[in-house]
Amino acid sequence: MANNKLVEIKNLTKRFEKLSVLENISIDVPKGENLVVFGRSGQGKSVLLKCIIGLMATDAGKILIKGSDLAMLSIKELNCLRKDIGFLFQGAALYDSMTVRENLEFPIKKHFPEMEQKAIDEKVINTLELVSLEEAIDKMPSELSGGMKKRIGLARSIITDPELMLYDEPTTGLDPITSKEISELIINLQKKLNMTSVVVTHDLICAKIIADRAIFLHDAKIAYQGSLTELTNSTDLFLRNFFSNELVKE
Ligand SMILES: Nc1ncnc2c1ncn2[C@@H]1O[C@H](COP(=O)(O)OP(=O)(O)OP(=O)(O)O)[C@@H](O)[C@H]1O
Ligand SMILES: [Mg+2]
């Protein structure tokens, strides 16, 4: 049974001094699922992703990735597990002083130091093809548009072939059409590469394209969960208010 679950979060609690950001949260993400995480600003969405990748220690509870309890792993084992996890950070900054090629080489060299340059070159080109930006290979980030930067950020986070992708607001700051393109790219990559994803977003267009299931974080709890349609059609006042405000942006 555990084999089917890529991520298992059991009674996770995360506090910053007196501030309780996540309180007794439990979520399972089965292999192949795209889970969308909603919640207002400051409700712990980014913190949740950082806990899943082991960047933030938890105060209580357990996180298992592919059956391994993060708290029980050595730094070396954790780094090894991180090869299987891609993270598109909120803001997804590229390294400004590096070309697109160098930005993409960076995670490969870190996780696969033994890989030969020829194989690295091929991997970089193939990954740029996946995001349709082969022509940007020798450009500097400052020469790219916001949407192009997102696509390169996406390429950089999938270049090590992760099984699990964590996206923190992948479409924020993009116009609706580019946002739709990025969301479609995410879902296509997910299908092509057989990935599982957890996607934090405020963007309903993105969620509609991506979500198999959604959860809504509020007051340190999972306040609601279900299919996107269940959440957006809910008669609950809080949800109606949240989604009607989000819908205005559509
Ligand atoms: N390293 C930290 N130290 C102290 N407090 C933190 C830290 N990281 C996050 N917090 C606090 O935890 C709470 C949740 O932050 P988080 O970044 O997860 O919010 P979010 O839901 O991602 O919001 P947004 O939609 O604005 O990105 C906030 O109150 C934030 O101030
Ligand atoms: Mg955030």
Image (spheres, rainbow, N blue to C red):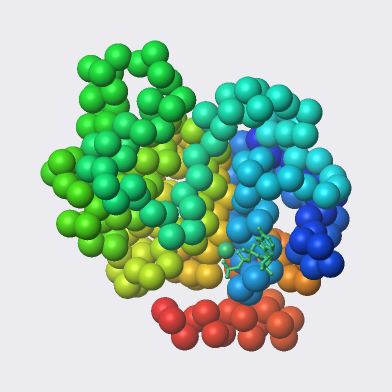
Where, by quadrant of the figure, is residue 65 drawn? top right
State the residue in front, 159 or 225. 159
Give the total of numbered labels: 0
Q: Give percent across and percent down for residue 90.
A: 49, 59
Where, by quadrant of the figure, is residue 182 drawn? bottom left
Apparent side of residue 62 relative to residue 165 in the rendered image (left or right): right
**Residue at figure coordinates x 84%, y 45% from the top left:** 61
Q: Give percent across and percent down for residue 8.
A: 74, 40
**Residue at figure coordinates x 43%, y 60% from the top left:** 91
Q: Give percent across and percent down for residue 22.
A: 78, 60
**Residue at figure coordinates x 54%, y 47% from the top left:** 166
**Residue at figure coordinates x 63%, y 44% from the top left:** 55
Q: Give percent across and percent down for residue 125.
A: 22, 32
Q: Quadrant of the N terminus?
A: top right
Apparent side of residue 12 relative to residue 52 in the rendered image (left or right): right
Where, by quadrant of the figure, is residue 145 drawn? bottom left
Apparent side of residue 63 relative to residue 122 in the rendered image (left or right): right
